[in-house]
Image (cartoon, grey):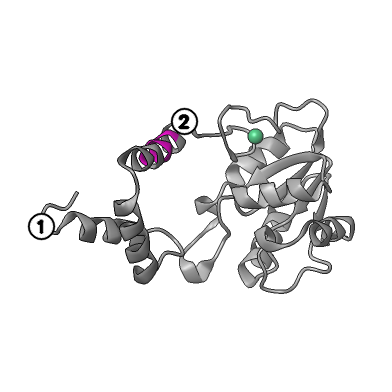
Amino acid sequence: MNKDIGPIEDLIKKLNRLPGIGSKTAQRLAYHIIEMDESEVSDIANSLIRAKKETKKCSICMNYADSDPCDICSNKLRDDSIICVVENPKDVEAMERSLSFRGKYHVLHGVISPLKGKSAEDVTIKELLNRIEKGNVKEVIVATNPTVDGDATARYIQNILDKYDIIISRIGYGLPVGGDLEFYDEITISTAMQNRRKLD
Ligand SMILES: [Zn+2]
């Protein structure tokens, strides 16, 4: 807490740090919060802290979950010979909504982007390799976004997995270039999955 500025000003500054919340929105939210009942505000504050404290990273797929391994990784009905690699946890949700995939996931938590100073060490590629090393994976579907960085990351994954006897494919057909998986509808995602192409 910053004691040098008033509580509203302090709250506006904190809200402004969140992605997608500019100073105008931060201001609007702050005044809205002030006008809410104290119990409602406590409720939101408690949810923020609880989500932060109780959310774990699944040690297999690296997705956020409330258990480790997560529900998807521990689901015996899902095919663990196919791994779908996505950029972010939100992409897993989008993929699940599309009902087009019954394998397992791997969440990179970002992409490789030399321009933004992000290298392979900044994403969970090492953890992906560990999973491949264990053996029974037959196909890796790279479902990073159809952006310059998403494509570069797909190529990087293709190169490091080249020595293994697995199929590496890339979704993309029908996906608008530069788009973001989390905003696509179910049909677009499921078509993109069906039309994945082998990387070679
Ligand atoms: Zn998992």
Q: Position of residue 172 (x, y in %)?
A: 79, 65
Is 170 covered by the magenta stretch? no
Residue furthest to the left: 4
- x, y percentage for residue 91? 66, 52
Question: Is 92 left, or right, of 43 in this rendering?
Answer: right
- Give the position of the C terminus as an image quadrant: bottom right
Residue, far right: 194
Q: Nearer the viewer, mark 1 or mark 2?
A: 1
Measured Cα–Cα span from mark 1 to mark 2: 32 Å
Question: Counting other residues with Cα less than 10 Å from the Cα at mark 2, is it few (<14), some (14-19), or many (20 or more)?
Answer: few
Q: Is mark 1 within 8 Å of ligand 1?
A: no
Write down the residue under mark 2.
54
Q: Which residues are magenta?
A: 45-50
**Type of the residue with mark 2:** Glu
Q: Amino acid at mark 1?
A: Asp
Label 1 vs 2, first from the N-terminus: 1
At which x and y percent is residue 73? Answer: 70, 31
Q: Is residue 69 above or below residue 45?
A: above
Give the x, y percent position of residue 191.
Answer: 87, 60
Residue shown at 14% from the left, 59% from the top: 5
- Asked whether, in this view, residue 35 is left or right of residue 88, the answer is left
The overriding secondary structure of the stretch rendered in magenta is helix
> Looking at this view, is 154 or 49 the one in front?
49
Q: Is residue 177 above or below residue 137?
A: below
Which residue position holds label 1? 4
Circle 2: element type: helix
Viewer-proximal residue, 183 or 179?
A: 183
- Quarter occupied by residue 9: bottom left
